[in-house]
Image (cartoon, rainbow, N blue to C red):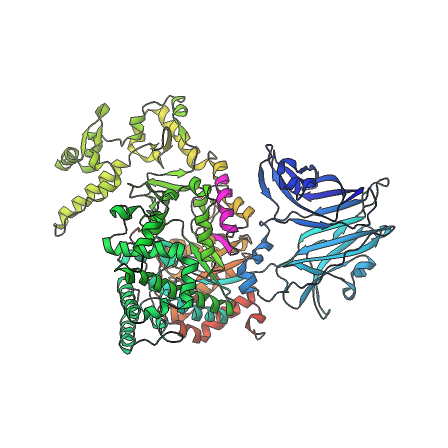
Amino acid sequence: MNEERRVLLHFVTKYLTKWGQNVVVSGAGVLFGNYDPKRAHWAACHHAGKDLVWEVIVPIPLVPEITYRYAIVDDSMSVITYASNTHTLLLPQSLEDGSIIDIYDEWMDRSHPGYLLSTCAFTKVILPDRPRVTNQILLHLQPTLNEAIIRFQVWDWEVQGGQEMCVSGGAPQLGNWQIQQVLQMTQVAEACWEAEVSVPLNAFPVTYKYAVGDKTGESLLLEHGESRIVALPMSETSRAPAVLVRHDGHFRRERRWRGAGVAVPVFSIRTKSSLGCGEFADLALVAKWCASVGLKMLQLLPVADTSVRGDWRDSYPYSSLCVFALHPMYLNVSQLGGGNLPPLPDSIINEIESARSTLSSLPDMDYEATIKTKLRIARAVFDSLGQETMQSDAYLKFWEENSEWLRPYSVFCFLRDLFGTAEHWNWGVFATPTPEMLLRLSSEDQEWHASIQFHSYLQFHLHNQLSAASSAAASYQVALKGDLPIGVDKRSVDTWLYPKLFHMDTSTGAPPDAFAPGGQNWGFPTYNWEEMESDNYSWWKRRLQHMSQYFQAYRIDHVLGFFRIWELPATARTGLLGRFRPSVPIWRHELESRGIWDFDRLCEPYVTNALLERTFGEGELAAEVAARYFVDGPGRRLKFKKQFSTEAALWTLQPRPGLPEELADEVHATRKGLLALRQNVLLLRDPEDPERFYPRFALSTTSSFRDLDLQWRDELSRLHDDYYHGNRSESLWREQALRTLPVLQDASDMLVCGEDLGMIPSCVHPIMEELGIVGLRIQRMPSECDVEFGNPSDYPYMTVASPSSHDTSTLRAWYQEDKERGERFFMKNLGGEGAATAPETCTPEIAAAVIEQHLESSSVLAIFPLQDLMATSAVLSSSRPAEEETINDPTNSEHYWRYRMHVNVEDLIEDYELKMKLKSMLLASGRAAKEDFGGSG
């Protein structure tokens, strides 16, 4: 440090803060407070057009370098957010005392679309050909008389190998805008370029643009927009800066990168080698097909093990048995032998071929037959050949890296099979695992050791097969996009090991809407975010890091759950009697101040004899129901008997097998009526605090509400609307999302997308934009409340555009099952106004028009279910009924996930007509380029 000379650092940045927020500059060392915001340098602001400009002058002794970062703080000096970049600034050591360094920093954070290309989906797969950072050092200049040094810095992740960044501008030192005389820049970090030049003071102001050129100097792409400018201070009395630093942020491209992809569940893939369902090994062929038409992303559904119940209900891919384990049904059993492994016995090869022939002839997946067949074959291979694998260096390395989850998972699977249930709370002494217990049960001297090892053996091969598929896809420059389920099954390894991380007495779901009037109940326990925060979200971080072994992008299922979740009691079976967690409750004193005091009347199911007669008729049934299920309550009301007081208890009322149809219908009607009466409440008590209440969703539709006096109805309606449709909890939800979502983002370098459909609070989209999370747009589920169909041409860049998804019917099926909307869609959105009538079915031409609409959108990605792409083919669309292509019905909690393609991927690859149709559409839209096909187009 040179104690004799001091310099003035003039920091300038632009950031539109909210009231009560301030910009500070903090950094390393005592001069900048050691990154402590309370000791940082506060900036002052002023308006410049639409911008809010923040400036601060910091006098410091002349030191070799400073490291600093901007932050946004509130009045209490708590950090709200940081700029993404930490800057290191080298100071010329020949600076005179009192010299000024003028530093302009473009505010950079992950809300900028350019950051998407910094994720591994692009850097490792889609755009892997990029300049490599060399050891070339930027030579820093020393100031000279009557000149000032300009330092340029710009970022861009789209620069490809063979290209370089430069500066062109209106000064001789920048080539006077001549492309042959540009100032070359030095790549100082991945995607970051810098340059320095000394310019006479009388040459200012200097206009300039950054440009990307090839190393031959024959082409030059100037950035889009107006020229940038660097000027000296306006005052003639002030001293001119010796150095002007311009950290200019992102290179401004006129056309941002856009691409397309296909969504296909692994289980739905059909190849000539798959057995019963699609397998990880089949993904290489799908990726090959993607590359042949210009698709850059292959989106999958969750692939975690869901083997909870041991029957077809485990086909539901969102109910994880263990978030780290892969599902054994995706195993290619033929690859358990051969290659570097001992060959499979002929008897097993014959069994595989026989099973493949039987199961492949089915139009859909037979989940139970498929998983039983694969486990039986895999166990036979393990018993005869497995020990050689278990002693290999590759397996021992896999075990060492994964034993933290693999040991408890393998023990859990053994205990599940031993007890015949995954309900671990019923396992007696094994209900509460300890490290010692896990070691003891998995010890090599236990007689059941082979049964435990078998599950680790399966995971080893599944890991190898998915890793190989991911590498193969990357070789085709096709990124794999995974799916992050919002919950885990209550009967899972994760809830067994970490019960404090979950509210085990609750269930996750979604509130009622037009598609599910009774709401949705997914059965997952809600997360205990406070407990997760106490260990810095280590479970989430490990989960995302594990996922990043295979995927370069992922979709957050129900991203709204990271703002607030619809929480139901564990005894609920529908999605109606829930509340948002977190949320601002309705306090007892709040109700009492409005004259509302009879809480039992509002919180208990409202049942009267007259209501029973309206529900069950005036005959004997109403009297029988009253006698069997109710006791007398206060105020001439009836009260459910304790054993029938929950939805779970009433759900068990099922007709006995063999009961005559008329009597069975009566049982169903009784259960339906009793459930409606159980739901006839207006307020829900908070089980954790008797002072807190929550309004029952759509309370004004209940008979309980109708029988209240007018004042109470008005007051409860206002409270209900404020809770569900107002801003009562918006700030709380924003804080929750800003605590949790960045944890997921920072855990890996995968591209993050979020499913943001449904009843969305106003804070969701702004925060997703702020965090740089890509949203989802489904055309027939528009985010705008005043339109029937979304218009892809209006979609923001930071979105995925899709005509349908696994949670909707396919494009063909929807068009046919909802004919009135389908006709309006054709007339209004596809330019069919001149036609007398709309086509009865979704023709290949209609499907192609919809695909083209989405391809032409501004969305960074257009991702299509494979069924919608096949709908553009007259041959493929006519060879299977549209209704058979739907993957899931969200309104059916017992849906069987079993859809399989009706054509082999090998045949899809050979389908020249479909390939050329899709390829030409992708090329015309700019989502694919001739270079993607070796320059042949």
Quarter where residue 44 is shown: top right
The residue lying toward the viewer, choosing from 474 and 321, is 321
Quarter where residue 935 is shown: bottom right
The residue lying toward the viewer, choosing from 447 and 701, is 447
In the depicted structure, whether residue 309 falls above or below residue 666: below
In the depicted structure, whether residue 918 falls above or below residue 816: below
Q: Residue shown at 56%/46% (left/top)?
A: 770
Indicate the position of residue 298 as horizontal and vertical percent values.
Answer: 46, 63
Q: Residue shown at 26%/60% (left/top)?
A: 448
In the depicted structure, whether residue 721 falls above or below residue 7: above
Q: Say whether residue 113 is left or right of residue 827.
A: right
The residue lying toward the viewer, choosing from 730 and 624, is 730
Indicate the position of residue 286 as horizontal and vertical percent values.
Answer: 43, 69
Q: Residue shown at 49%/50% (left/top)?
A: 744
The N terminus lies in quadrant: top right
Indicate the position of residue 338 as horizontal and vertical percent values.
Answer: 37, 76
Indicate the position of residue 682 as horizontal and vertical percent values.
Answer: 33, 32
Q: Which residues are magenta?
A: 734-759
Quarter where residue 154 is shown: bottom right
- Magenta highlight on residue 527: no
The C terminus lies in quadrant: bottom right
Q: Let me know if residue 806 appears in the view.
A: no
- Magenta highlight on residue 755: yes
